[in-house]
Image (cartoon, rainbow, N blue to C red):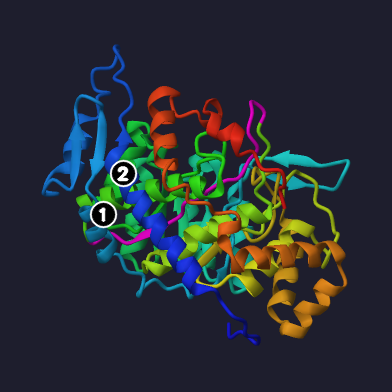
Amino acid sequence: MIKKYKRIVPENLWNRLARNLVYDAKQLLLYCGIRLPQVKSDDPDSDYQAMVDHFTHGTTYGIIQDPITRRIHFEPEYIQNIIDLATRFDFPVYDNSFGPGGIAGYIVEGDEPNVKLKSPELNDILKQAIIAKNNEMPFSYVCVRQISKFEVEQFGVMTRIFDGPAFFNVSTPEGVDEAERYHRDGHYIITIHSIFESPLLFTVQEKLEIFIDCVSRQIPVMLVSQPFSGQNAPMTPYGLALITFSEFLAAMALAYSINPQTKVVNGSFPTMCTAGRKPELKIGSVVHNFVNFLIAYTSRLLDIASVQSGCTIEGSKHENTILDTDYQTVRAMILWENLFEGWHMLRHTYGFLSDLACFSFEKALDDIIALRHIQSLDENGISAILANNVRLNRDYHRAMEIYQNPTLIFNREQDTLLNVIVETVENFGGDFGRHDHTLKNIPQEWF
């Protein structure tokens, strides 16, 4: 979409921040690396050694195993070689694309106080496909936690309606077979994988096996990690971004070590939340959107396909407060459409409630109408929306201050942050809530 307005973009500041993030991620992967889970005494096959051999074979010492510390370390030069191989020039989604997320864990039906939750069915995937097609979404997305029993059927249901790029969750060999079949038949299929548990720890072997299988067959993969600030990632926005991007770079390096022809999408999901034993997600906050934007901007700078999370809201209640939808949804749409530049794809654009746990088709339609209205406006139209809402006007101008000077929230902490991460991994089992760095950096303001 051609913008109707122009503004000064502080590229030099964001470029510098992105370069710092890449450099620091390389250092973290070199000195800390990725941890292997402890061997289970009752399961001799849980040593991950065969997988480690698979990843490290033929990498000319670019990926190195330390058997004493049970970590995998990555040479910075090797990571840079992987980055240089990455390209998104043939990825069939244009920049600044809003699209759907998955259908989430539950479908919301009815209105307050008679809300009902139901597990997704194939008919709900069909509805999602119809929404994506009718609203000319640039991609579709199917990732439902309870939908594993429909893992094979989901491909046929979605691709029968929607013929663009589609993201699918696979967790079984049968799902991989189906993904390969549809990929071979000309559909642009991207499978979704989480091979790490934050911070910097390999996940269960079954997920790794599915990941290796997809990459070996040259099926495009989206690599996802979801660290939480103050929990399994530092409390600071930059620290959260650093853990997130490091895990993505490590996953991309492992994918390329198996098959250098792999098409990779950065699907990392840095998640802002409060510290403490009962954390509250802040995925509708301005800071959350900024952290996701930093990951997206860095990926775009490196020419890596990237799909981030935005336009979400906190809590379960859907309130028609502005443009017939939720305030946080509209605020994020205006930020990504009118302020942020240099990003690729955005998921979770519409329909989500309860911190992404639930999906409402009614809310989805409201959100899409709001999005299309915002996209139709010129600079004067955006100014009119801001002028008519004091809170939105205040938040937008505060966000503009951050955008023009990102160091207001992104403090690199060059001399301490890597040490904080290593200390937390080694001494506190990856629980950042136990490190005094978290207590010192609990923010006073959540936008």
Disc 2 element: helix
**Which comes sooner in the sequence, label 2 or label 1?**
2
Q: Nearer the viewer, residue 116 or 417?
A: 417
The reply to whether the magenta stretch includes residue 331 is no
Quadrant, the N terminus: bottom right
Amino acid type shown at disc 2: Leu
Q: Label 1 is placed on what type of residue?
A: Ile
The residue segment tinted magenta is 261-278
Single out the residue that lies furthest toward the front. Answer: 415
Residue 206 percent across, percent down from the top left: 34, 34
The disc label shown at residue 69, or none: none
The structure residue drawn at horizontal position 37% and vertical position 50%, both measured from the top left corner, is 24
Left/right of residue 44 with respect to residue 88 in the rendered view: left
Q: Secondary structure at mark 1?
A: helix
Q: Nearer the viewer, residue 230 or 65?
A: 230
Left or right of residue 76, residue 178 in this image:
right
- In the image, farthest residue toward the top: 42
Circle 2 Cα neighbour tier, 10 Å, few/some/many (<14 / 14–19 / ≥20): many
Q: Is residue 43 above or below residue 186?
A: above
Residue 79, disc: 1
Instruction: Identify the residue under disc 2.
Output: 29
Q: Position of residue 28 (x, y in %)?
A: 34, 43
The residue at the point 60 percent across, 39 percent down is 441
